[in-house]
Image (spheres, rainbow, N blue to C red):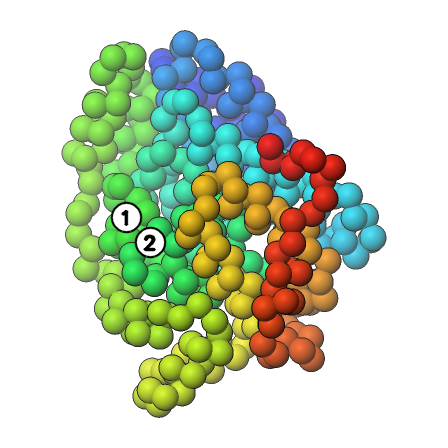
Amino acid sequence: MNQDNIIIQTYQGVGVIQLNRQKALNALSIDMVLGIQDILKQWQDDPAILFVYITSTSERAFCAGGDVKSLYEHEIKEDYSYAPYYLKEQYKMDLMIHDYPKPVISYLHGYVLGGGAGLAMATSLRITSEDVYFGMPEVHIGFFPDVGASYFLPKLSDHVGKYLGVTGKLMNSDDLMVLGITQYKISKERFLGVEETLFKTHWNKDTFEQKLQALFYAHHDPSVSGSVIKPVMNFINKFYAYDRLHEIYLSLKQDDSKEAMDHMSNLDTLCHTSIQITLELLKRGKSMSLHDCFKMEYDLALYVVGTPNFREGVQKVLIEKTGNPKWTKDDKDDILEDQMKSIFKTHDFKGIHPLD
């Protein structure tokens, strides 16, 4: 079965989903989201499909995110029905993969950002290439890390999740291995042979999981010497032990080192409202279930897509690509507790949440 933006194929025991929106670096359009949902429903009870493999036809990206531009375009046209619909379906797709009764494997290469990272984190086995750029850079556009980030970021080592959510820093393949985000690292050149084996093998229901692990392990490169996260772990744990932005700033100022001052200067360019919301989100997500985290993110997203900072961030960073968004005048202000409660309020869906 061929669709414009996804390609679906089946082999002996494996169902393959190829993301195929190359010009947009596989940003997840609504038809891609719905198409993935539909095929996963078909394969769920199909005894001929033992596991699912998600990959990309693009040389440059696995998936560069959700279709944020479409959210922006509908918002500025005052079509306020599209964001709730798109976000609901995207989150439903991610939850479907998280909860899928069969193994779902993803091969990550190139850009794996935002919604693409959320899609990857939903899969049960993740393999990285040597050229991956993985991250949640939503604070750069006046948004926040969603698609399950409130669940999976707090589970990373020490305070790394907060650091990644607040800064939007990208990780390389060795970082992903160090943090346990991926289970295997296999170069693109070697993975061509692995993929051929995936498609040509007649997988057996009783042995396929063991044989898959053996296949990936045989081509796995365990070295992590190129990690950029590992050398800064002490820095992260020193300055990101706090849950409020003003506390992080105060600790950086008190340190007064060049490294701390440079980091503070970088934070100054980002949307402080988004950072503060992100810190609160990750704090709350620590003690919440996966499904409750998605519901919290959905409610929050409906608020944030209507804000001036979101529109400004998308306009300057993703559309004009000039960077340097002009955040609102009150963006540097501390969000007080009562304000935060209002931002995180649960919407009235007349008794049934869209993600229930």
Disc 2 element: loop
* Residue 273 falls in image quadrant: bottom right
Front-lying residue, 333 or 4: 333
Q: Residue at x 45, y 59 (%)?
A: 283
Q: Which residue is mark 2?
A: 156
User: Where residue 88 sits: x, y (%)?
Assistant: 64, 39
Q: Looking at the picture, which amino acid does disc 1 mark?
A: Gly
On screen, residue 9 above or below 86: above
Q: Give the residue type at disc 2.
A: Leu
Name the secondary structure under disc 1: loop
Indicate whether 39 appears above or below 127.
above
* Foreground pick, 110 / 95: 95
Q: Is residue 320 visible?
A: no
Q: Nearer the viewer, residue 160 or 61?
A: 160
Residue that badge 1 annotates = 180
Percent from the top left, x then y, of residue 153? 40, 53
